[in-house]
Each structure stands twice: as structure tokens, then as C-alpha cells.
Amino acid sequence: MTTRRASNDRESALIDATLTCIAREGISAATVRNIAGYAGVTNGLIRFYFKSKDGILRAAYQSFLEHLFEAAHGAIDGSYLSAAERLERYLLANLSPPIVTSQSLLLWANFLPLAHRDEAMADIRRHWYARTTEAFRDLIHEALAEHGLTPDDNELRRLSVAVNGLIDGLWIEGALSAESLDVQEFQAIGLDAASRLLGVPVSRTAAS
Amino acid sequence: MTTRRASNDRESALIDATLTCIAREGISAATVRNIAGYAGVTNGLIRFYFKSKDGILRAAYQSFLEHLFEAAHGAIDGSYLSAAERLERYLLANLSPPIVTSQSLLLWANFLPLAHRDEAMADIRRHWYARTTEAFRDLIHEALAEHGLTPDDNELRRLSVAVNGLIDGLWIEGALSAESLDVQEFQAIGLDAASRLLGVPVSRTAAS
DNA sequence: GCATAGTTTATGCAACCGCATAAAAACAAC
DNA sequence: GTTGTTTTTATGCGGTTGCATAAACTATGC
């Protein structure tokens, strides 16, 4: 029999198994028995830690988006940087692994339809989407202020939508062609494009 | 019994039923019986027109991407326009229904994991992705030439990646917040952003 | 009008699904 | 080491899955 483990360990191990299963075989293969197989336990155990299959899927979605968010924010947390440097690091993190990987894109794509039907999962999605949008807006606001630019709320929102869209789109392109694309050049394209959108250099090496 | 129909009609009706089913309930609910229910026939009929369930899914994916591609290219086909106008129309089509709808995004998200595991579906995806990439590159190439700009192949590729990414990212944002976003402003953001990326106005009304 | 070919349905099968329940095993307290 | 609690497994149930097959139905040629 599998050795007994602390509740928190087991719970997060089951969540990790769920994410691995979905990324590798898709949401249709994410059955209770298959997830249990990935975790090396028997299927009944999942019902001991989660109320239902929907329960573990919601927990997995929450965990996935949280990790994605922290992967980006870990790059700018706790260090004293100029606004331009903070924006540059944030953009670079969003153009690098572990965010730009086929695994993260596949997880996102598998969960999106669930978040469109299940209201609880829709709430999770909205929560982390709002936090990401705020982060972009604040970073852009500060970076522009550093150059003496003070756009009004509407103009700031439009710039944020454009930059956010650019990063999301490059994320898709990068994740889908991870092997054929040079990472350095990919990041240079992103930073350069962001500089043009904002009309302000986001890194010292970016051409205008 | 359902009235008998010509093979082509029945086949495309089954494909449409498949797409409707996937968009509404997700790929996990796209069972042979459920798809047959959407089409108003019994489940055995699907095996008469398609070799297997994978067969109808592949046909549906092919049909979906083809329609998406044609929705964009229908905007610039067969009319005598300047390069800038062609690019503007192409971008606008990619920022409007039926491309920017939650339905198309959901279909894309549902199929993507399949295209990552099934080699036949991967081929379909690569085919249409390549055609879209070429279209963007050619349109950008012509629009720049109209302003006397002749970037080398590498620079043109970088610009295409950036604009393509921007449009894809805005597509996601637009489809996910279709009700809260003003369509006119959304399109203006996209055209304005593309103008900045290219360093050239893509429409007469676009600010620089 | 009737044989023939082409469509559609009806039915069944083995495998799998989520979930419930009870037994078994692992651990902690003393 | 015995007792009691928590974690894990084992097993089963009703329903659903993809797929195969045969029967029933519809249209067409003559």
C-alpha cells in the first residue's frame, strides 16, 4: 500500500497529477481513475480529498493560474528597480519558460471551455485575469510616468489592452513553435514591439 | 425516419453539428450519440459517413479552420485596393465577428490539444497556420513598399510575428469580453497598435 | 411495380465513467 | 501492544462510451 502522507502533500500531489494528466492527454482523459494513476494511488482516494471530480478540476485550475501569475510576478518582486526595468523584466518573464511552454498553453486551452460553462471556474478565471490586467496597467503607467508621460485613464487602458494582447499572442506563437523559434530573438521581438506600442523604450538595448 | 439527403448535405450537416456540439458543451461532450442528436439523426449514421469518431473530428477541424481563414480573406478578395487598404481590411476582419466570437475561440481551444496529440490534426493546423502567416507577411510587405520601405526578409519576418501576435492576442481578449468591450474602440486599438508596430499608418484615420 | 442500390435506424457488446460504501492498512497516543 | 483515528484500498452499481452488425427504410432505373 502507498505510504501514508500529510493531507497537504497528498492534496497538492493529486492536483499536480491532474495538471500533468490534462497537459499530456487532454481534459477528456482526465478521469478519476487516470488522475489517480498519475499520482500512483487508487481512484477512491480522490473522493477522500475532493468533494467531486469537478472539485479537483477547480482546485487544479486555481493552482495552475496562480503558478502562472507568480511566475511573472516573481521576476519583479522585492527588488528595487526603475519602472522601465520592472516592465522589461515583467515582459521578459511573460516571454520565457515556464510561461511560454506548450504545457502551459495546453493547460490553458483545456481549461478555457470549462471556465466558460462552469460558473465557479469562470470566477477563478476572472480573478486572475483581473490581477494580470491590473499589473500590466500599473507597470505601463509607471514606465510612462518615468518619461514624463501622463496618459488619461482611457488612453492608459487602450495601451494596456494592446500590450496585453501582444504578449498573449506572442505567448501562443512561442508555445506552439517552441523548437523552431530562437528564444533570444523571440524576446527581442516582444520587447521591441512593446517599445513601439508605448512610444517609450522598455529596455536599454531596444531599438525604437 | 429522417428524410434521406444527398451525401454532401448530410456530411456537412454532421460536421456543423459537431462544431455546434463542441462549441456549446466542449470536446468531452462530443460523443457520437450527442453529435448525432445535434444533427437530428441516430448515432449509427455517423459511422456511415466517417470512418471513426476521429474521422469526423478531423473533418470538423479542417472545416473550422478553413472557414476562419476564408472569413478573413473574403474581406480582401477580388477587389482593387491599395496595399494599405488591403491590410486595413484584413486586420479589421480579424478583429470582427465571425472571427472574434466566443464560439470561434472555444472551438480553437477545444481543438488545440487534439492537434497536439493527433499527427493528422497537427498537419491540418500547420497547413492553415502557414497560410495565415504568409498572408500577414505579404500584406505587410506590400503596405511597407507603398511607403518606400523595403525591409529584408529577417526584418519582415519579425514584423509579421509581432503583428500576428498582436492580432491573436486581441482576438482572445475580444472573444472573452465580447459584451463589456466596445467593438469600435476595440478595432481602433488594433489598427492603431498595428500602425505603431509597422511605423506606417494602416488606415487614413489612424493616429501615429 | 419491382428489383436494386444507397441511407438510416435498431440493437447489442465490451470497456469505461463517476460515485458510493465497506473493509483494510497505517499511524498516533498511551 | 492495544485502542482509536485517519488515510488508503477494494469492490460494485447504474449509466455511458465507441464501434459492429443486421434489419428497415427510401429512392431510383427500367
Image (cartoon, coloured by chain):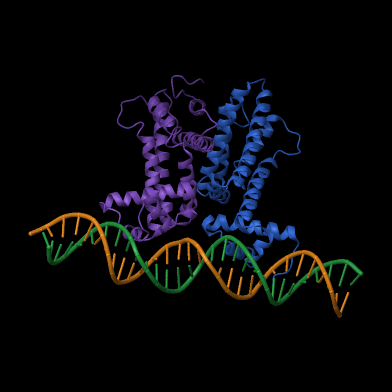
Chain colours: A purple, B blue, C orange, D green
Give how far across and how far down residue A115 sits, in percent: 46, 52
A117 to the left or right of A5: right
Residue B85 pos. (x, y %): 68, 33
Residue pictured at 46% horizontal, 46% vertical: A107
| Residue displayed at 48% across by 50% down | A25
Give the image location of residue B90, x and y in percent. 65, 37
Up the image or down, B175 lies above or below A99; here it is below
Residue A122 percent across, percent down from the top left? 43, 52
Q: Is residue B62 visible?
A: yes
Residue placed most toward the observer, B4 or D21: D21
Q: Is residue D8 left or right of residue B56?
A: left
As drawn, D21 above or below A31: below
* Residue sitting nearer the eye, B164 or A46: A46
- Left or right of A71? Residue A157 is right
Residue A73 placement: quadrant: top left
Question: Number of callouts in the render?
Answer: 0
Which of the two residues, A159 or B60, is positioned nearer the viewer here? B60
- Answer with the quarter of the image where residue B69 lies: top right
* Location of the N terminus of chain A (image quadrant): bottom left
